[in-house]
Image (tube, rainbow, N blue to C red):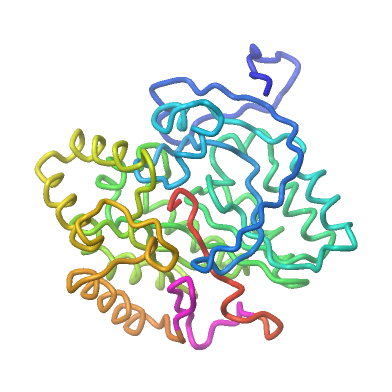
């Protein structure tokens, strides 16, 4: 990997500014020429087989991000390294085009992204996700996007065209009902109010869009489920899904430390509730268990989610990804089953 370190170019007219307060630590950007870009998964918990991740690490800095341990494979840390040392796969669009041209490729659904947010701030500069979606449009290959970023609005027209000729969906992750609480746990992600505005903008542009209420953190944001679904439905969301908080590897220590620092009065309650739905543990890594919970408390959360889906029109049979769709939703093509639209939120996001 090659670290990027350039002074401003006086001959380039385009400038990029932070829409939200910039991170306290300046990010280090590394460029990489990847060997492949399509990641295959065989997890029975997920509703997709292929994913594209143009970036490693994520500047959104969500305390609970399940992808944090992937940085440890690079010899980096799962804490601030994950948030500030970002790798950019500069040849992602070329690799995706080559993959689609292969005789072995069957035109299957592609998820953007299975790990870190494909529309995190660096996408404004590198435009890798947009270029990859343009490749999908060239080959009429269906795709779905999961993000917290408002930057996806830039590509609304492109996504709408892809939805018309193949299939495309966007899932906006909203875990909290109020901006302040979200800022304590997701410090550099756009606030929920702006994400709701993004749902509205995408829906008005003709992009099938839904909401991912994830992660549901027992003892903290489970009480927000009804409000999030109500506002998302009003903004134009046509499907909804949810997942329980999961804390693989060192994510547990990062999350608990952040909670203790930002909301000390609630930290003990949150940890207690989390252990309650995990049989006394912080995490359960078994397939079929890692994205859900067990026991009376979690069952009450499930009942709340189902009731809110019915109340706000997100009706339909639940799928592998705990997803509900509006009965009148036009976004599910007849050629694709409900199972093929499963989402795993980035930094789940």
Q: Tell me the quadrant of the picture where the N terminus can be found.
A: top right
Give the residue at x 41% y 61%. 286
| Residue 88 position in % (x across, y down) | 65, 33
Give the residue at x 57% y 67%. 204
Is residue 322 rendered magenta in the image? yes
| Residue 14 position in % (x across, y down) | 68, 28
Q: Main secondary structure of the magenta part?
A: loop
- Position of residue 221 in the picture relative to residue 340 (left or right): left
- Position of residue 222 in the picture relative to residue 163 (left or right): left
| Residue 255 position in % (x across, y down) | 29, 41
Q: Nearer the viewer, residue 236 or 169?
A: 169
- Position of residue 185 in the picture relative to residue 320 (left or right): left
Q: Nearer the viewer, residue 345 or 294?
A: 294
Q: Which residues are magenta?
A: 318-332
Query: Where is residue 166, by image quadrant?
Result: bottom right
Query: Where is residue 137, by image quadrant?
Result: bottom right
Give the residue at x 25% y 76%. 304
């Amino acid at each position: 990997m090659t670290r990027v370190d350039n002074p401003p170019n006086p001959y380039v007219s385009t400038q990029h500014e932070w829409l939200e307060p910039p991170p306290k630590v300046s990010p280090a950007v590394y460029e990489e020429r990847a060997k492949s870009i399509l990641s295959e998964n065989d997890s029975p918990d997920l509703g997709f087989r292929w994913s594209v991740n143009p970036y490693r690490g994520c500047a959104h800095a969500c305390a609970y991000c399940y992808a944090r341990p992937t940085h440890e494979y690079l010899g980096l840390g799962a804490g601030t390294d994950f948030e500030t040392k970002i790798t950019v796969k500069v040849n992602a669009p070329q690799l995706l085009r080559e993959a689609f041209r292969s005789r072995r490729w069957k035109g299957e659904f592609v998820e953007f992204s299975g790990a870190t947010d494909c529309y995190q701030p660096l996408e404004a500069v590198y435009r890798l996700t947009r270029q990859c979606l343009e490749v999908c449009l060239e080959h009429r290959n269906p795709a779905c996007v999961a993000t917290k970023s408002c930057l996806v609005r830039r590509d609304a027209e492109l996504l709408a065209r892809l939805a018309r000729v193949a299939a495309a969906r966007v899932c906006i992750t909203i875990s909290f009902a109020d901006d302040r609480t979200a800022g304590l746990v997701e410090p550099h992600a756009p606030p929920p109010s702006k994400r709701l505005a993004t749902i509205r903008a995408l829906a008005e542009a003709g992009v099938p869009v839904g909401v991912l209420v994830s992660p549901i953190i027992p003892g903290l944001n489970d009480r927000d489920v009804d409000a999030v679904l109500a506002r998302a439905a009003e903004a134009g969301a046509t499907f909804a899904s949810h997942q329980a908080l999961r804390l693989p590897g060192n994510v547990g220590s990062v999350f608990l430390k952040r909670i203790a620092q930002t909301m000390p009065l609630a930290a003990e309650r949150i940890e207690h509730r989390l252990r309650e739905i995990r049989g006394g543990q912080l995490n359960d890594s078994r397939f079929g268990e890692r994205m859900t919970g067990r026991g009376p408390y979690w069952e009450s959360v499930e009942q709340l989610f189902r009731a809110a889906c019915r109340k706000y029109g997100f009706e339909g049979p639940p799928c592998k990804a705990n997803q509900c769709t509006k009965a009148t939703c036009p976004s599910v093509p007849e050629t694709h089953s409900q199972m093929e639209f499963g989402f795993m939120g980035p930094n789940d996001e």
